[in-house]
Image (cartoon, helix red, strand yellow):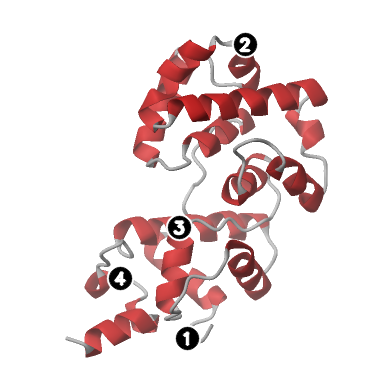
Amino acid sequence: MHSKITFPELYSCLRNRFGFLDWWPGDTPDEIIIGAILTQNASWKNVEKAISNLKDAGCLSLSSIKKINTKMLEAYIRPSGFFRQKSRRLKIFANYVLSNYDSLDVMFMKPVSALRSELLCLHGIGRETADSIILYAAEKPVFVIDAYTKRITCRIYDNKKEPEYDELQRIISSGIKRNLGLYQDFHAQFVELGKNYCRTEPLCSKCPVRKYCLFGARSDKSK
């Protein structure tokens, strides 16, 4: 990757623009995990509706997810989309954790690499979901790569092809300090930039990192 800006400089620029961002939404590790599964192929706005339904029903925990009738669970999480698929994933996750561990704390005592490998073996848990659970629920430093991160880095560094998940994770992680708070807030900064400026149809003229972005510079020249 070649650009005028390093990852620490990019983070500093975004932090100056957006301030500290309190992310991920969720009051407990259980809620964070449930949200991480529900947000697959869904907007957070719709996930919030599903979480609100679960909260109102007193079902916002893994133990409740395990006990609840499947049809009821599907009805509660319907706003998040793919509700049958996600219901099954939530059930499998809850059953696995509660059958194999006394608590999430015990599971989260494992080293990052072992915990990640275990999570990836569970049905419906991909790399982004596993890393979100590790970073925000287990509170261990692993950098989450989502669609916003891929799009933004691809544009800033003017890559013709988006890097693979593990490759981009390695590149970013090697370019910044290994720090839980930094990893969490930097990921949140990518999300904020992606939602408000670096959209599918980008708002380059208003982007806070426009002067560093090779895609933006190329776009300016083509006008």
Give the image location of residue 54, x and y in percent.
47, 19
Q: Which residue is mark 4?
A: 207
Give the image location of residue 184, x and y in percent.
57, 54
Give the image location of residue 89, x and y in percent.
58, 29
Q: Separation of disc 3 and disc 4 at Cα?
A: 18 Å
Point out the frontmost of discs 3 and 4: 3
Q: Residue furthest left?
A: 223
Look at the picture and state if 122 lies above or below 183. above
Badge 2 or badge 4: first in the primary sequence: 2
Tell me the kind of residue under disc 1: Ser
Describe the element under mark 4 as helix, strand or loop.
loop
Q: Is residue 20 left or right of residue 120?
A: left
Q: Are marks 1 and 3 in contact (CB under 8 Å)?
A: no
Tell me the kind of residue under disc 4: Cys
Q: Which residue is mark 1?
A: 3
Q: Residue at x 54, y 82 (%)?
A: 1
Q: Separation of disc 1 and disc 2 at Cα?
A: 52 Å
Q: Is residue 106 left or right of residue 209?
A: right
Q: Which residue is mark 2?
A: 67
Q: Separation of disc 2 and disc 4 at Cα?
A: 47 Å
Tell me the kind of residue under disc 2: Lys
